[in-house]
Image (tube, grey):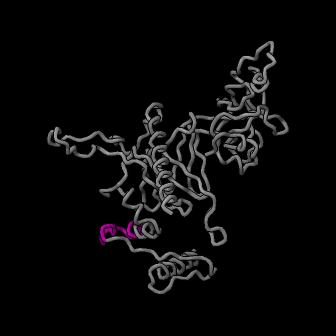
Amino acid sequence: MSMVRTKISATFSQLCKRCYSTANSSYPFSSSVTVPSPSPPSPSQIPPKTASLLSTLNTHLSSLDPSSSSLIPLFSRRSPTRVLPGSVLTVTSYSTPPSASNPSPSLTTFSGVLIGVRRRNEGRDLSIRLRNLVGRTGVEVAFKVFSPLVKEIKVVQRAETSGPLLATAGAKEGERRKPVIKASKRAKMYFVRDQPNRLTGVAGIIKQQREREMQAENRKGARR
Amino acid sequence: MLGLKATMLVIDNSGALLAECVNVLKTKTGHGMARIGDEIVVVVKRARPITAGAAGTASATAQAAKVRRGDVRRAVVVRTKYPTRRPDGRYVRFDDNAAVLINNKKEMIGNRIGGVVAAELRNRGWGKIVSLAPKVV
């Protein structure tokens, strides 16, 4: 039992040294593996010294992911730019982990309404739940945000509590436009499962976004 | 997680509409519940009415109901309300339970599938079903 404990602590300290060393990161078992240099967490994310060891560790672990700098502000609990439940997101994921021999395996996309974000352990296994109507059946997929199989997460349409201020001549002071998607007053939108008519507009939003992307690509192609 | 008495939609064109599970075949798990890709034995609870005198049109043969209410058939589970885990930690959950009728030789009774199916079927050896399905999640 004690041997196992020392073995674990030895490899763990090695891992820490390797991760936080300024020398070239190297993986001793294969030359074709690339080790991304981890970015230390931003000063706002570093927990205070009074925080527990595990909490500090989890914060550092969640910042190790290469795309964490863009994803943590999207899903963190108190981030000012966080995505509210009710927003429409698109997740593109690989079917198998990308390796040196197969750097870009086949992709699958899933778009849907964000009905919940699971934040435990300082964001270490952050997972989001997307719901959409595929055909006539509702499908919910829970994605692990920092999984290497998740290629990217795009925000198609944010849910807002109130729209932008109207600056037209006839508008009263403080009048606002209605948002495209009004954010619900719930962190978890499980009530949506009993309301089949609520998500019918989502497909239209996703389609519009795809058309916009296609047009942008066509314009790029025409320029070339 | 479909066990005895679990009801599910039948999403092929075999004529059955609603089926009830009667037996779960050869699952290695102790709980004896069917997951996506498992074979089960079902009783057809509701079926499309079989037209007595078949009109000789081409569409009639495609929609020919082959199954009656009360028939006992085998089926493959294609959608469950119980979330299934993908290897990368993804969980997929559908809003209903659904199955596709098959015969003893693991061939489909119908020839079309109308609805989403889970991608787990590909790994479980039901490639035919996956290829016929209009959408796979």
Q: B52 left or right of B97?
A: right
In this rendered view, identify the residue nearer to me: A160 or A125.
Answer: A160
- Report the number of discs: 0
Residue drawn at 45 percent across, 84 percent down = A21
Res. B48 visible in picture:
yes
Q: Residue furthest right?
A: B105
Q: Residue furthest left?
A: A173
Q: Image height check: is A76 above or below A33?
A: above
Residue drawn at 32 percent across, 45 percent down = A160
Q: A147 left or right of B21?
A: left
Magenta span covers which residues? A43-58
Asked if residue A176 lies in the magenta stretch, the reply is no
In this rendered view, identify the residue nearer to me: A98 or B102.
Answer: A98
* Position in image of residue A177 (x %, y %): 26, 40
* Position in image of residue A179 (x %, y %): 31, 41
Res. B65 visible in picture:
no
Asked if residue A46 lies in the magenta stretch, the reply is yes
